[in-house]
Image (tube, rainbow, N blue to C red):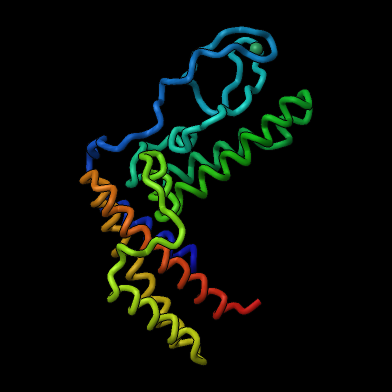
């Protein structure tokens, strides 16, 4: 069910994809890393290359960059409106190229690097797949932080709405009622995701932040619904 909701959100996000999204957003500088030398054979190679990088001379796997750009790892535009299908394809192809079997005959150092790359790829995929974490990451790249417990910008009406849904979830519920709440949450998440998308397109980071805070509330509610449906 969650996978379905997610893919619906993703479709909603894609539907709002506009061409040539204004790059008012600051993203990691893509060409900033200096040209490197292979740790194994010392050959120089250009800073920009596929990720993970292999030395063109000796094919040794290189370590991950210290501050990797998650969008670049996943081959996505640095934008809220990413192509989710492309993200998933890229994830599968990176997973294949970093499969431990492929490195079993390599040095310990390369096996370690491949594990580091793997966890980085997992983190990048998870971060960019969910609209909430993708939005928060974009804010972070632009120096906008979401401090804990600062909901002062959130309207009282909104908080009331959340509280009401919370209360409905606490009451004993039959499956149909829970699914009703689940659909409501899903609709709200789609609306908010569309709003976040538009805010980023306008370069309105404060509005994006405000909507992402709201989206976070609904994500919490979604978690509650899930545990209500499948109690541990
Ligand atoms: Zn080399």
Residue at 50% from the left image edge and 13% from the top image edge: 35
Image quadrant containing the C terminus:
bottom right
Q: Position of residue 219 (x, y in %)?
A: 45, 66
Q: Position of residue 50 (x, y in %)?
A: 50, 25
Residue at 55% from the left image edge and 79% from the top image edge: 229
Residue 58 as seen in the image, left or right of residue 143: right
Position of residue 216 relative to residue 112, above or below, is below
Residue at 62% from the left image edge and 41% from the top image edge: 119
Query: Relative to the observer, which residue lies in front, 97 or 112?
Result: 112
Q: How many marks?
A: 0
Residue at 36% from the left image edge and 34% from the top image edge: 27
Q: Position of residue 91 (x, y in %)?
A: 53, 42
Query: Relative to the observer, which residue lies in front, 56 or 229?
Result: 229
Q: Position of residue 22 (x, y in %)?
A: 22, 37
Position of residue 110 relative to residue 75, above or below, is above
Q: Quadrant of ligand 1?
A: top right
Residue 59 as seen in the image, left or right of residue 16: right
Where is residue 109, by image quadrant? Answer: top right
């Amino acid at each position: 069910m969650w996978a379905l909701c997610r893919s619906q959100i993703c479709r909603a996000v894609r539907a709002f994809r506009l061409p040539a999204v204004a790059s008012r957003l600051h993203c990691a500088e893509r060409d900033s890393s200096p040209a490197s030398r292979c740790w194994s054979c010392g050959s120089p190679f250009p800073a920009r290359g596929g990720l993970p990088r292999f030395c063109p001379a000796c094919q040794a796997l290189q370590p991950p960059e210290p501050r990797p750009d998650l969008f670049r790892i996943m081959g996505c535009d640095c934008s809220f409106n990413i192509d989710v299908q492309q993200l998933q394809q890229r994830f599968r192809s990176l997973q294949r190229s970093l499969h431990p079997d492929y490195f079993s005959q390599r040095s310990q150092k390369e096996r370690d690097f491949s594990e580091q790359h793997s966890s980085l790829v997992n983190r990048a995929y998870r971060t960019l797949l969910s609209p909430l974490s993708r939005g928060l990451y974009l804010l972070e790249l632009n120096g906008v932080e979401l401090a804990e417990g600062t909901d002062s910008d959130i309207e009282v009406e909104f908080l009331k709405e959340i509280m009401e849904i919370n209360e409905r979830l606490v009451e004993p519920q039959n499956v149909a009622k829970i699914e009703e709440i689940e659909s409501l949450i899903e609709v709200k998440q789609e609306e908010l995701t569309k709003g976040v998308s538009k805010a980023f397109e306008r370069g309105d980071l404060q509005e994006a932040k405000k909507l992402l805070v709201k989206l976070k509330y609904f994500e919490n509610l979604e978690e509650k619904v899930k545990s209500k449906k499948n109690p541990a």
